[in-house]
Amino acid sequence: MLRIGRSAVQSHKRKEPVNEESKVCRFGCPCGDDCGVAVAEQNGEVRSLGVIPNREDSVRKLVRKLGPVEEPRFCYEAGPTGYVLYWQLTRMGAKCEVVAPTLVPVKSGDRVKTDRRDALKLARNYRAGELTPVWVPDAAHEALRDLVRAREAAKKDELRARHRLNKFLLRQGRRPPMGVKLWTIKYLEWVKREVHFEQMAQEATLLDYLHEVEHAAARIARLDGAIAEAVKLAPPKMRAVIAALQALRGIAHVAAVTVVAELGELSRFARAKQLMGYGGIVASEHSSGERTRRGGITKTGNAHLRRVVVEAAWTYRHRPAVGTSLRKRQEHVSEEIKEIAWKAQQRLHQRYKKLLANGKNKGVVVTAIGRELLGFIWAIGIKVEAAQKESLQRAA
């Protein structure tokens, strides 16, 4: 969804010039094919300009129709079409913002939704300053984010493929020998050498399921290599933050890359609590008067970030220690970062034990640990980005 505003523009009904920004245009692309467009006059009417194709030439024609490109202000809702429209408008010299669709005000009694009505609503709210813009990643962050999300999708496909093979063997009563763990090299060798069926149909099913498991594993290995190469070509600031985050327990290379790709610059969050809210890992609340009522986490933020930090939080159930792999990851980070990582181990482990002793469910405890882990991620990111900024200033 998108809106535009510009200064010193007169409506066809207006007799006097307007000195403030007066036009706002919004594009709505619910299906990715067409855009609903609306213009909001400052202190005036909000009118629809119809629907245009979501194509570069159509957008360029609309911008030319609205007058000098420096005057309008555009906005549209984040969605499946990504940031292509944002980059097109900014390359033309226009001002554009991508707004969060979940934070657009909605009337409880409104049950009619069309592209035209959505465009009018967005333009009206943008003019009133009631929309919240989202962070738009640069080319490096967006490319890295696409890659780590592709790996996440590959891991999900691998899990499904393993489940299909495992359940097929269970249905046929085939169990691995004692001491052979699932999905190890010995397990796969047992499946290939020892598991066979008299029926040709079942043998073909086994081969297909096994092929899918091996294909998924090869796909993940290929993506891991691509991520490693992409990090080498990333900007120095991004590489520094990725290396520093790996000083934390539970945050290895892929997890650190995922955090940086999803968050961008951590300094854009003024406080750690803002980052926790962005991850959707803070408690929901429904309080009134003297009554205070809190529920489960909101889950309204970045689900990819939330998954990574909650998975990492499970490692803090173990007592604080620096193992071989963690010590190797900490070789090239500063002592200040190591102190923050060690403080995280001590605090989060004690927190885990205390909450568990109070009778809390283990899943709830780990979620709470993940929320606090985001605070340590923010602290490390702020330190590293500030140090990178100072070094650039000295070099200049």
Image (cartoon, helix red, strand yellow):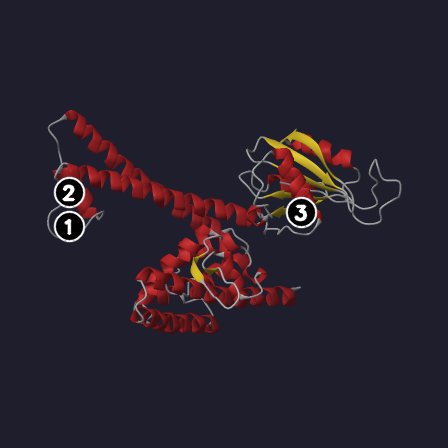
Indicate which disc, 3 or 2, sits on the residue closer to the N terminus. Answer: 3
Q: CA distance from mark 3 to mark 1?
A: 61 Å
Helix, strand or loop at label 1? It is loop
Is residue 4 in view?
yes
Q: Are marks 3 and 2 in contact (CB under 8 Å)?
A: no
Q: Are marks 3 and 1 in contact (CB under 8 Å)?
A: no
Helix, strand or loop at label 3? It is helix
Amino acid type, label 3: Asn
Q: Tell which tag, 3 or 2, sits nearer the viewer.
A: 3
Q: Tell which tag, 3 or 1, sits nearer the viewer.
A: 3
Look at mark 1 in the image and give the residue it sits on.
180
Amino acid type, label 1: Val
Indicate which disc, 3 or 1, sits on the residue closer to the N terminus. Answer: 3
Across and down, in percent, residue 246 comes to 42, 62
Indicate which disc, 1 or 2, sits on the residue closer to the N terminus. Answer: 1
Res 4 quadrant in image = top right
Helix, strand or loop at label 2? It is helix
From this view, report whether residue 124 is shown above or below residue 36.
below
Look at mark 3 in the image and give the residue it sits on.
125
Amino acid type, label 2: Trp
Q: Residue furthest top?
A: 200
From this view, report whether residue 167 is shown above or below residue 204.
below
Q: CA distance from mark 1 to mark 2?
A: 9 Å
Q: Are marks 1 and 2 in contact (CB under 8 Å)?
A: yes
Across and down, in percent, residue 142 comes to 53, 47
